[in-house]
Image (cartoon, helix red, strand yellow):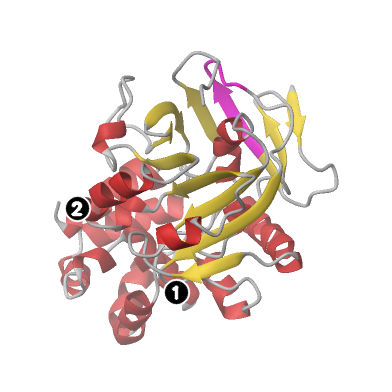
Amino acid sequence: MTTAERYRAFAVREARGQSPAYEALALTVSADQRLLGLLDELPKEKRQPNLLFAAAQYLAAPVTAPDEFRAWMVRHWPKLSATMLRRRTQTNEPARCAAMLPVLARLPQPLALLEVGASAGLCLYPDAYRYRYGDGAAVLGPADSEVRLTCAVSGDVPLPESTPAVVWRAGLDLDPLDVADDDDVRWLDALIWPEQQQRRDRLHAAVRVARADPPHLVRGDLLTDLPALAARAPADATLVVFHSAVLAYVPPDTRTAFVELVRTLPGHWISNEGTGVLPGLMPAAVVDADGPAMFVLALDGRPVALTGPHGQEIRWLIPHTVSV
């Protein structure tokens, strides 16, 4: 896929209906040879639309005005490209907990959570957030939680009756972000799309939760450092290794090696990745290749649902029972 095709696909499949500003910006970039030429100077993995636009927001670019952005990007390319090379797309969306909760709540309790690609660790607190599913019939979680998550449901979703009991939480990341570092939080803020103030408010509420009980984050590689961290989980808890929107950013051979590795660990494995990222986990349900982007939620390599990339919906694929 060329850089132009990548930006057009982002505009149509990811930004459309979610961010008019990013849809317009991505289409502008996809049609501008000068901007594409600048992006093609970067390593392929650093040409991502989300990375470009987050770096631009971080540097206070005019992201809601495509014509102004075009001139700004050319003028500020040295600083912009340096930011893109230094930073990663580490969107830490706590609402993805809502998509994973129906699986987490049905595993043998208590849980020891280990997130791969943890960013700042905000998805390590599913027990601290308040959830509303569907039309509101299912509401659970601490009543005083500042983090309020709403998730649409379709199909026979096994709605949880309570949040899981978490006794240990740890994260692994090549470049973990520190919730106590204001600049790291500023980067997390820049990763949120311009119109999505609700997500921005939710991010800062989740940061306050994490600052009150800082997560244990380890700088390391998902292949070489995962077994040692998993071995530190308490033996009397169910180890759950999970990841969401992570494996798309690693090479296919690394993904294959990771799947082989995680299957050797005790406990359970939850993946929540874009369709096609793990071809062996593609569900039998038809996914519209031209429709909105969706993730595949899987338990131990078995697809159970399609989910919204930001945890906004669950489309259940299997009968009500989740076997463990």
User: Does 210 sit left or right of 66 as displayed?
Assistant: right
Instruction: Kindly identify which numbered label has been placed on residue 233.
Output: none
Q: Counting other residues with Cα less than 10 Å from the Cα at mark 2, is it few (<14), some (14-19), or many (20 or more)?
A: few
Looking at numbered disc 2 in the image, what kind of residue is underneath it?
A: Asp
Looking at numbered disc 1 in the image, what kind of residue is underneath it?
A: Ala
Q: Counting other residues with Cα less than 10 Å from the Cα at mark 1, is it few (<14), some (14-19), or many (20 or more)?
A: some
Is 101 in the magenta? no
Residue 30 vertical placement versus 286 (above, below):
below
Q: Point out the frontmost of discs 2 and 1.
A: 2
- Residue 64 makes an appearance in the image: no
- Residue 286 makes an appearance in the image: yes
User: Residue 219, how many percent across, how many down?
Assistant: 46, 72
The residue indicated by pointer 1 is: 61
- SS under mark 1: loop
Q: Which residues are magenta?
A: 150-158
The residue indicated by pointer 2 is: 253
* Residue in the image at 63% along x and 58% along y: 203
